[in-house]
Image: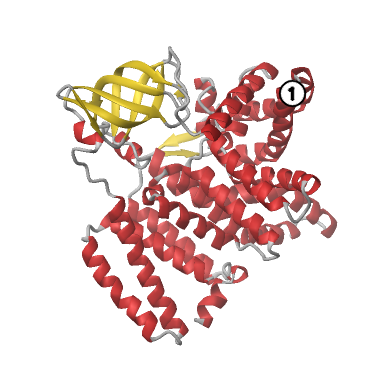
Amino acid sequence: MILFYLGSAWLLGIYLASLFQVPTVIIWLAAMIPAAVVILWWREHPTRLASACCFVLLLGAARFNASTPRFNAHSLAHYNDTGWTTIKGIVVAEPDVRDRRTNLRVDARQVRVDDQWQDVEGTVLVQAPRYPAYNYGDELEIAGLLETPPVFEDFSYRDYLANRGVYSILRHPQITLLAQNQGNPIYAALFAFKEQALSTVGAMLPEPEASTLAGILLGVGHGLPKELEEAFSITGTTHVLVISGSNIAILAGILTAIGHRLVGRQKATPFVLAGIMAYTILVGADAAVVRAAIMGGLYVLALHYGRQSHALTSLVVAATLMTLFDPRTLWDVGFQLSFAATLGLILLVPPIREGLEIWIRKWLSETNVRQALNVLNDALVVTLAAQLTTTPVILYTFGRLSLVSLLTNFLILPAQPGVMVWGGMATLLGLVWLPLGQVVSWVAWLLLTYTVRVVEITAQIPFAAIDIHRPNLIVIWLYYGLLGWLAWKGGWLEPLGLVEASSSS
């Protein structure tokens, strides 16, 4: 459990550094104290662990400070809001195609200043027309209004983009294509495969089932009709349309079975890890997907080396690795929801299942208890556990409380593994021979239609969702503090080894 404590200290250090602006030199000077304590009191385990956590906390704070952008003449953002600007750069992400425009994420290489090209660094979000279409790896010359992202009354688009490393936007661009295929060839091949897969899904299934499968399978959620997208939001089931840990778990199981047959049990692990990495890139590699992929990879490695994967430690390690690369991942809403949902599954599923079993035993015979638990366990228990930890994040971020979320999730979650498996099989077969994929897609269509109809029906229930004022951040932390206290006092942490670890310290 040492990794859990150190990882938690790292994350806390990043968060505290965002609240208190302490110069980096002071942080490094302060870090010398716990470092010295670790060395001088090495044999005393409690002192060593506490000091190591303090040292790592300060390292996390220093890492956050180092990630704070400092704009100079060689930074693209230095030229924001200076009028008409011309830049050269390369499209470094899959184009985000919307109804009326395409968002291009471009890494700028040069900017024109006084009729001379000057080297710069920085990423700009270019809001381009849908046509002509541009692709990953295209080198472009772009002229337009380079601006700092705006801050609205109820939403900071500037912070949203900053957490993704983007500090400039360019509207109304005039674009000239300079070259193609300037990106990573592996990424280019994966994105080309994704386009073929999307076309295959569209050819096999009608709408809105096709767009729903595209979201569940490939992480493409912008093709849904506005009414259905709103229905998923009202019912608190938007998470179904994004890639999550369940997708990675199913994929890992399939790849493991294939790997055992193709290369043998001992050599299957690199095959599985490579497949998880490729799928992560394929679906966009956002924070939630990366978190799930790292946890899935750690689990696969644990099985390979014959060690039990500790879920809570894996979660913290995944978050630590992601924030080591980019500390601002901590403020990505997708990451927060994914982290909170996984934490809920780890901490709350066992006590909720135990409480549900005690309640059911009061009403049913022993034979029927097991049958009832099998029906309720995955759908009701998992949904309730995830909602208890994600609801504060949803309320603080979106200001909406879904009153039918538990019911809708209970009804549709059992169908989602089937959607993933049958939809994935149909897509792969359809890429080889469309008629064969069409036949298999009928099963996926039934499950998708069921999912869509349940969402639409429950969204129409009166007062299905209510808009509320965003709660104060202090209230959010008090809620999580109370949940943590209950987990500690209720003994929920004992099966995870935290209580034993702390007592032995």
Residue 202 in the image: above or below residue 324: above
Q: Is residue 322 visible?
A: yes
**Residue 251 screen position, x and y as percent:** 67, 42
Q: How is the model colour-coded?
A: secondary structure
Residue 400 or residue 139, whichever sits in front:
139
Q: Residue furthest top?
A: 131
**Residue 220 screen position, x and y as percent:** 54, 29
Q: Is residue 6 left or right of residue 452?
A: left
Q: For the point 71% across and 29% down, which residue is it?
A: 428
Q: For the point 39% across and 86% down, which residue is it?
A: 41
Residue 97 in the image: above or below residue 324: above
Residue 228 in the image: above or below residue 468: above
The picture quadrant where one finds residue 64 is bottom left
Q: Amino acid at mark 1?
A: Val
Q: For the point 32% across and 21% down, which residue is it?
A: 141
**Residue 232 screen position, x and y as percent:** 54, 31
Residue 318 or residue 150, whichever sits in front:
318
The quarter of the image holding the N terminus is bottom right
Q: Residue furthest right?
A: 367
Secondary element type, mark 1: helix
Q: Residue furthest left?
A: 114
How many C-alpha atoms fall within 10 Å of the one at disc 1: few (<14), some, or many (≥20)? few
Q: For the point 75% across and 26% down, which residue is it?
A: 429
Q: How many marks?
A: 1
Residue 109 or residue 422, whichever sits in front:
109
Q: Is residue 16 visible?
A: no
Residue 275 or residue 461, whichever sits in front:
275
The picture quadrant where one finds residue 180 is top left
Residue that mark 1 sits on: 432
Residue 32 in the image: above or below residue 469: below
**Residue 314 screen position, x and y as percent:** 56, 59
